[in-house]
Image: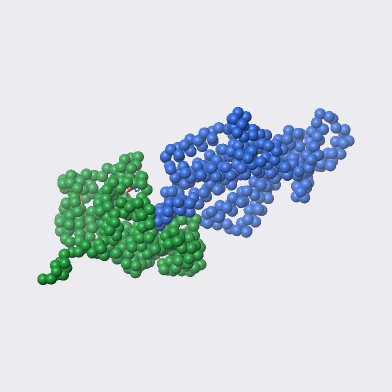
Chain colours: A green, B blue
Amino acid sequence: MTVIDDISDVPTPDASLAPLLEVRDLHVEFHTRDGVAKAVNGVNYSVSAGETLAVLGESGSGKSVSAQAVMGILDMPPARIPKGEIFFQGRDMLKMSGEERRKIRGRKIAMIFQDALSSLNPVLSVGYQLGEMYRVHQGLSRKDAKAKAIELMDRVRIPAARERVGDYPHQFSGGMRQRIMIAMALALEPDLIIADEPTTALDVTVQAQVMELLAELQREYNMGLILITHDLGVVADVADKIAVMYAGRIVEDAPVHDIYAKPAHPYTKGLLQSIPRLDQKGQELYAIKGLPPNLTRIPSGCAFNPRCPMAQDICRTDVPPLHPVGTARGSACHFWKETLGE
Amino acid sequence: MGRYVIRRLLQMVPVFIGTTLLIFVMVYGLGDPVAAMFGDRTPDPATAAQIRHDLHLNDPLWQQYLIYMQHIFKGDFGKASNGQPVTELLGTAFPVTLRLTIMAFVIEAVVGIALGLFAGLRRGRFFDTGVLAMTLLVVSIPTFVTGFVLQYLLGVKWGVVHPSVGEGAPFKDLFIPGLVLAGVSLAYVARLTRTSVAENSRADYLRTAVAKGLPRRRVITNHMLRNSLIPVVTFLGTDIGNLMAGALVTERIFNIHGVGYQIYQGIVHNNPPTVVGFVTVLVIIFLGANLLVDLLYAVLDPRIRYA
Ligand SMILES: Nc1ncnc2c1ncn2[C@@H]1O[C@H](COP(=O)(O)OP(=O)(O)OP(=O)(O)O)[C@@H](O)[C@H]1O
Ligand code: SF4
Ligand SMILES: [Mg+2]
């Protein structure tokens, strides 16, 4: 019995093991003419360095809004964050000044948007837009920034980078434009990248290439990655863990393979059943019945109850907490056991 | 680009011929210029015939037009009824009107864009509402009313400025006339800029600029303003013509001896060479300004390709 043994038994709060990003009980609402839209209602998730978290969910479930809250780019008003904490490298970003947060954006956390054509400035050359990262954050000269921009374009494998650095976004193909978005996010080698449906706007043929590039760069720089997507196929390939969102809440979170093998929430199950599969070719595709709720009037109890095939009386009155399922999983369903068991 | 400019210049030829021919024909509807030269006196028939011959007044109209154009391209715009060469009148009148137009243009662009930008950035707030109300007011009052009211209040009653513009039309005397002339256009520029800024501030690329961690000032100046100004620049360009037309009215209010004054004199005293000469130069300036705007448009928006 030595002192050292004692210590080794206690889980020490080692900073390097703490997650890079930890979102706790995040709420976001929008004040609109029709009332208060509660877009995010108590989201919890975390990402560590080198880890990929996939965020899944139907349109309007609050995936982008929660990501934009992390990024600090929500327009406030109309948005408001009434509650929650967003710890990044141990500090709550919601308590920082605007200037502190600005310095994190681009440098430490970067974001890739869905539609690269509309997300790049149409009247500035890509070289200018890439170089701007170095000019603003590192004070490089115009000339040095341009050289860095060319280097970046090479990095994301854009052919003839030197000749094309002065071209404008509309002169590139969709896949190349998304590579430019990726390059821009990568410029200052951030610790965390948030990719909001980075391949949705692309041709199927280039989707895989772009996704591969992103995953490769993430590995190389050991970055944390939050990948927002509709594409469950992509998720299976690149994600370490999954968070499924419904009506602004995480309804299930789990390591990627657990979810595919056995979903613990009826909503996740519905999503998985709605993927087209080769062995069921010709059969009608499953679709979850009904529509996502109006966010100004979210149903009481479990928000999914009007659409859930397993709903019971308790579902209409009691909000299900996130029940732990095994060690690393959680399901916000009163009947998670039954869901798993079937 | 070079080819585009050449094509545009060629396209201007029929426009130029069309407008000048039209004015030429119209001016001849005014009456007999020879009779006008002599005023109340009846001219000696022989002299009148001689003048008619010298001025080619007996030839068919289209021939007169051709002769006139030939002279113009040699720099000869003919003579006014008092014997002064029209080129001399052009030389004194155009600088005055150009100064007035430039004054108005600068006021319109600078004040209009500034008001629109700040209103657009503070949509729904007090400043924005104020700008909207003010511009509506300006647009709904006729220019000559604003002109006379300002002239009376600032010039006559309070004596802050000269009620009429002095010899040579110095810029300081032109400020109030320029403001009056710019008024309505300024209101449009402010509103257009406001709408454009509001639209662009919701654009995806602006969200990207914020996500890049750029300071707000840079987001606005380098990313938003340039995109927002594209429609405004187009408007400003086409508005040069309006300003020049409006200048003719403003000149009368403030008694400025510019192009408007000369054309008015030309019409009242039935003097074709003056009227046609001035209008021809106006047409050339107008066409040139339009070409310049189109080229500027391409500089601002790289998506526009000239082929
Ligand atoms: N500026 C805003 N004003 C009002 N409501 C907003 C605003 N931005 C987002 N919302 C609302 O927040 C809800 C969540 O939107 P969010 O963009 O996060 O959905 P999402 O999960 O990303 O969907 P998608 O898959 O379509 O991207 C939506 O219902 C939307 O209407
Ligand atoms: S809590 Fe009830 S309604 Fe909600 S998912 Fe579970 S079974 Fe369905
Ligand atoms: Mg989204």
Q: Which image quadrant for residue B178?
A: top right
Nearer to us in this view, A171 or B264: B264
Query: Quick check: B241 above or below A253?
Result: above
In the rendered structure, the answer to whether residue A227 lies left or right of residue A123 reads left
Q: Quadrant of the C terminus of chain B?
A: bottom right
Residue A145 at x, y percent in the picture: 47, 64
Q: Residue furthest right?
A: B46
Residue located 49% across and 62% down the image: A142
Residue B102 at x, y percent in the picture: 62, 44
Query: Quick check: A319 above or below A107?
Result: above
Residue located 64% across and 38% down the image: B173
Q: Quadrant of the N terminus of chain B?
A: bottom right
Q: Residue furthest bottom?
A: A1
**Could one spot residue A231 in this view of the protein?**
no
Q: Residue furthest left?
A: A1
Q: Which image quadrant for residue B283?
A: top right
Residue located 87% across and 36% down the image: B47
Nearer to us in this view, A145 or A342: A145
In the rendered structure, the answer to whether residue B16 lies left or right of residue A96 reads right
Nearer to us in this view, A81 or A168: A81
Residue B213 at x, y percent in the picture: 40, 56
**Could one spot residue A166 in this view of the protein?**
yes
In the rendered structure, the answer to whether residue A81 lies left or right of residue B26 reads left
How many circles with numbers are drawn on the protein? 0
Query: Quick check: B165 above or below A291?
Result: above
Residue located 59% across and 53% down the image: B295
Residue A119 at x, y percent in the picture: 42, 56
